[in-house]
């Protein structure tokens, strides 16, 4: 065998392993690529299925969700946002409608020469009418009480003199008359009788004086048909209970006489008072428009509120000791409430009806009367001048009755 042949055979033997190695490498590469494609396909299909099932409720690239994958809670959030925006818009419109009709009321008490007279208090008021060149403002009785002169500050800052046409302590209302040449906006009264607890309420006025004129606070109607005691004589005793609306819209000193407004921009109450105890928050009260309107009309036309008159001086039975109830008044043990006649005025309906000192009134037209407040409320809210009133009373322990005709 020649040397050339031997060399050629050796070369072929040396190249054989390289060929086998190349075949193994390509076979592994093909298998790996195929396996990777299969796994990728499985993962992609799995993820797509989970996405369709809303397991991944994320937004798409354009920042929006498809209608098929949008959760219900997102829909509710959108609806709430729309409602809030609508209410905010209504609040703005209501304020714009009535705010120019809310004015400042400045009371002056002259304590000496003109140079010594000074401002003694500020409050708010509402222009409710304009006629024959004049404008009419409703405010609170306690805002103008004791004033020597009064100025009304319009929404634009112009100050004009106010004339008191009338004032009523029981309802805490007063009516002023001003020059109407600079008045452009008049408030409209709405119905307080149709209100429901939870409705939005806006208080507009001048808290803490004219520096914060036209301030608006927002809240709700917190309660209806509330009653607040009124001390008519300054002796710390309740002589009357006035009907009010309760609201948590902030009412501060200076807001008195301002407007409580609904979302339609209508005046549903005249802000009157708040409970100012340190531990109390959000207890403000307004005179309902249904109560205020007839009183305003009386004050504007006649300067006073016409109410029926009996002609008696009284004392609550609850202020008398148990011994006096039985020994002096000789009342039955079951009579614990009523109104004692302390005196009758001459030529009065009570005198004409035969009422005497120490008579104890317990019923009016068959309705139980437990206090002077109850008797007054029944007279002023249920009866009119010229009406007859049947009274049931005790005299010397004996129950009797009489009828009187109410006068002005």
Image: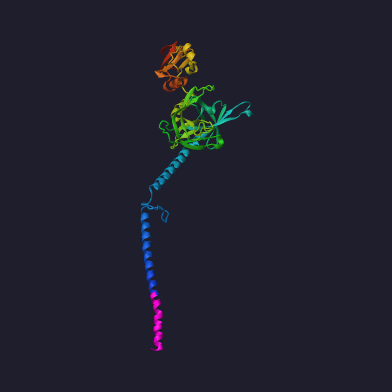
Q: Which residues are magenta?
A: 1-20
- Residue furthest out toward the bottom: 2
Q: Nearer the viewer, residue 325 or 296?
A: 325
User: Residue 107 at what x, y percent from top left?
Assistant: 56, 29
Q: How is the image coloured?
A: rainbow
Can you see residue 228?
Answer: yes
- Residue furthest out toward the front: 1
Q: Nearer the viewer, residue 130 or 291?
A: 291
Magenta stretch encompasses residue 5: yes
User: Residue 397 at what x, y percent from top left?
Assistant: 44, 11
- The residue drawn where x is 50% and y is 37% is 216
Q: What number of labels is visible?
A: 0
Where residue 197 sits, quadrant-wise, is top left
Q: Nearer the viewer, residue 35 or 227?
A: 35
Q: Nearer the viewer, residue 200 or 237?
A: 237
Q: State the predominant SS element of the stretch in magenta.
A: helix
- The residue drawn where x is 46% and y is 31% is 246
Where residue 362 sits, quadrant-wise, is top left
User: Residue 91 at what x, y percent from top left?
Assistant: 46, 40
196 over 371 or under it: above or below: below
323 over 53 or under it: above or below: above
Magenta stretch encompasses residue 287: no
Can you see residue 183?
Answer: no
User: Residue 276 at what x, y percent from top left?
Assistant: 53, 31
335 over 293 or under it: above or below: above
- The N terminus, quarter of image: bottom left
């Amino acid at each position: 065998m020649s040397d050339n042949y031997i060399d050629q055979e050796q070369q072929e033997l040396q190249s054989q392993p390289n060929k086998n190695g190349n075949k193994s490498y390509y076979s592994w590469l093909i298998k790996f690529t195929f396996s990777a494609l299969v796994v990728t396909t499985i993962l992609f299909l799995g993820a797509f299925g989970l996405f369709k099932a809303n397991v991944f409720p994320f937004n798409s690239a354009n920042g929006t969700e498809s209608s098929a994958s949008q959760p219900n809670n997102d829909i509710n959030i959108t609806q709430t946002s729309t409602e809030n925006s609508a209410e905010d818009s209504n609040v703005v419109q209501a304020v714009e409608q009535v705010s120019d009709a809310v004015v400042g009321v400045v009371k002056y008490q002259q304590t000496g020469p003109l140079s010594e007279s000074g401002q003694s208090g500020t409050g708010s008021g509402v222009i409710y009418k304009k006629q024959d060149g004049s404008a009419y403002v409703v405010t609170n009785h306690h805002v103008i009480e004791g004033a020597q002169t009064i100025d009304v500050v319009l929404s634009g800052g112009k100050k004009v003199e106010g004339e008191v046409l009338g004032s009523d302590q029981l309802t805490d209302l007063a009516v002023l008359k001003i020059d109407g040449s600079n008045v452009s906006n008049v408030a409209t009264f709405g119905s307080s009788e149709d209100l429901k607890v939870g409705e939005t309420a806006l208080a507009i006025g001048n808290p803490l004086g004219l520096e914060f004129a036209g301030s608006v606070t927002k809240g709700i109607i917190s309660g209806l048909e509330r009653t607040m005691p009124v001390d008519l004589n300054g002796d710390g005793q309740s002589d009357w209970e006035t009907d009010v609306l309760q609201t948590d819209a902030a009412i501060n000193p200076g807001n008195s006489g301002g407007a409580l407004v609904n979302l339609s921009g209508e005046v549903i109450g005249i802000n009157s008072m708040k409970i100012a105890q340190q531990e109390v928050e959000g207890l403000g009260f307004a005179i309902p428009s249904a109560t205020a309107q007839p009183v305003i009309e009386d004050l504007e036309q006649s300067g006073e509120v016409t109410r029926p008159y009996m002609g008696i001086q009284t004392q609550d039975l609850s202020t008398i000791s148990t011994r006096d109830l039985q020994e002096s008044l000789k009342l039955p043990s079951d009579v614990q409430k009523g109104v004692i006649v302390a005196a009758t005025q001459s030529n009065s309906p009570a005198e004409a009806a035969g009422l005497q000192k120490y008579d104890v009134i317990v019923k009016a037209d068959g309705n139980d009367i437990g206090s002077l407040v109850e008797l007054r409320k029944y007279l002023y809210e249920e009866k009119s001048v010229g009406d007859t009133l049947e009274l049931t009373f005790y005299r010397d322990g004996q129950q009797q009755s009489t009828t009187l005709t109410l006068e002005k």
